[in-house]
Image (tube, rainbow, N blue to C red):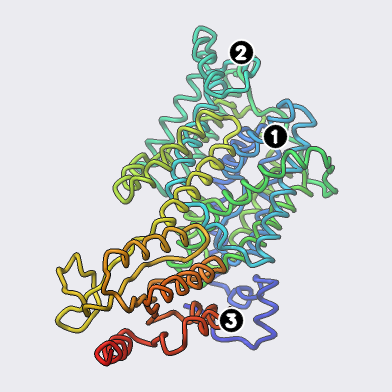
Amino acid sequence: MESPALPGEHRGLIRWFPFLGWLPKVNRQTLQADFVAGLTVALVAIPQSLAYAQLAGVPAYYGLYAALLPVIVGALFGSSPILSTGPVAMTSLLTAASVMAIAHPHTEQFYSYVILMALLSGIFQIGLGLARLGRIINFLSYPVLHGFINAAAIIIGLSQLPAMLGIEQGQRSGHFLVDIFHVIERWHDVHTISMGFGLTALVLLLLMKKTAPKFPAVLLVVSLATLISWLIGFEADGGTVVGTIPRGLPGLSMPVIDFRAATHLGPAAFIIAIISFMEAMSSSKIIAIKTRTRWDENQELIGQGLAKIVAAFSHSMPVSGSFSRSALNLVSGAKTGLASLFCAGMVVLTLLFFTPVLYHLPKPVLSAVIMAAVLNLINFNQFKMAWVARKEDGAAAVVTFVATLLVAPNIQNGILTGIILSLIMFLYRTMRPEIVVLGKDENGVLRDASRYNLPKLHPRLMAIRFSGHLYFANVSYINDSVLGIIGNDPNLQVILIEGDGINSLDASGVEMFTNLHQRLQAAGITLAFCNLRRNVAAVMKRTGLEKIIGQDNIFFSEKHALWEINKRLNVM
């Protein structure tokens, strides 16, 4: 249930410090529930963090660092206290793909740019949140997003093949699919034990997810694999393991800012800010519905942005709200943000006492963890649904999917392609709004005359309706359509525009109506309006269009308009 109303100053404090809203709710019962939930999430988050660090192309301990301070900051300053922040697959892939374009993997420069990416994407998110631009995410249509996610999931899975098969990644060509083909060509170089570890881990993870979804399968598989790796001497036999993880907590320092690199990484950082927030937003919405609480998309942007910036200052990689771990947090009974703090506490214990245990963890097993996690993202049914809803949406999904695959590893260009295509199709659809000639049914309601076979309203009157925003891209089409309609009716003396469907009016629309009025007036035809929306009427008044049309030709309702116009025509 929602908390009772608070005094204005308290609401202001909670806006900037959201944790003040849930701290008073902490009691013995919530502490117990949060501890259990935090422990449960930590058992999944710790091995996943190691895997996602591998996906991002950075040392394993970057993942543990990303699961510490960013988790705490995300819980304290985000609007959804149950949202679990930390490393996620999509953000890790985008980071690696973006940085790879300007730095060689597994170099100090590469790691430095990954940290810089966390800083830049965090700044973008905080800027969007402070400017109250959370709804900018709506510009990313779901068909485009589904096309991108499906392609990215396939890329994430295929990117793990070299580690899964124990094959050294050769010289990169700059084209992801070509590199994967070269890996497959080298099947004779497969390290059999590595492949055995990877495939066995993947099968176990998938089976346990199906048969025991609440069981921490990742922890069990990783623990068993690490033990077996140590017993059989996997590393000595040519296998790759996580290796030495520095013991101790991360230090805090200012990230190295390379302004030239920042210029190159800026567009990709903005894409990461948007895509990572989409995942956090979807989780927050579900949590809000399940717990019957509110969440603020702008505050969540600030919280996620602060988490990324803290990640940069603690030598880590970009983070985001995790859909899977947030769901686990919710199912495990988390009540407040303390669940995330308990989860971070487990990471602290791991960094202080258990890093030597992780030395023999096979990297093929981490690849299996990544593959198992992203398999859920692949859903081609969404393409079919988009196509059925509207063929243009289906096309946008397919084009984004194909483009993302073709431009990999620069997958941010794939989603940019989808966004541009969506905007073009949106402009095309809104450039040609449907214009309907109206007639009056037996109940006196104006309806589509052609569809319902209705007679003319009056021999010298015509009423029309069109829906949507009247702006620069469609005013020419509307003007030509209106002139075409009246050109077929030599007896016409009044044309009435039913304005309830006009959502907005810009300067181009005002000029179009001004010119249309003058042209119709010269032909002896009166232009009239009814049912105008408040914002449209306000624009007409401010710009003087109301005086040009004449206040006596603008009616508050269609009933009033028809009565008055018919009275005038009958007098003529």
Estimate the spatial distance between the alpha carbons at disc 3 and disc 2, rounded to whole Å. Answer: 80 Å
**Amino acid type, mark 3:** Arg
Q: Secondary structure at mark 1?
A: helix
Q: Is residue 76 above or below residue 385?
A: below
Residue under numbered circle 2: 237
Residue 40 seen: no
Residue closest to the eye, 166 or 391: 391
Quadrant showing the C terminus? bottom left
Q: Is residue 120 above or below residue 168?
A: below
Mark in the foreground, 3 or 1: 3
**Amino acid type, mark 1:** Val
Residue under numbered circle 3: 542
Residue under numbered circle 1: 99
Q: Which sits earlier in the primary sequence, circle 1 or circle 2?
A: 1
Q: Which quadrant of the structure image shows residue 54?
A: top right
Q: Which quadrant of the structure image shows residue 35?
A: bottom right
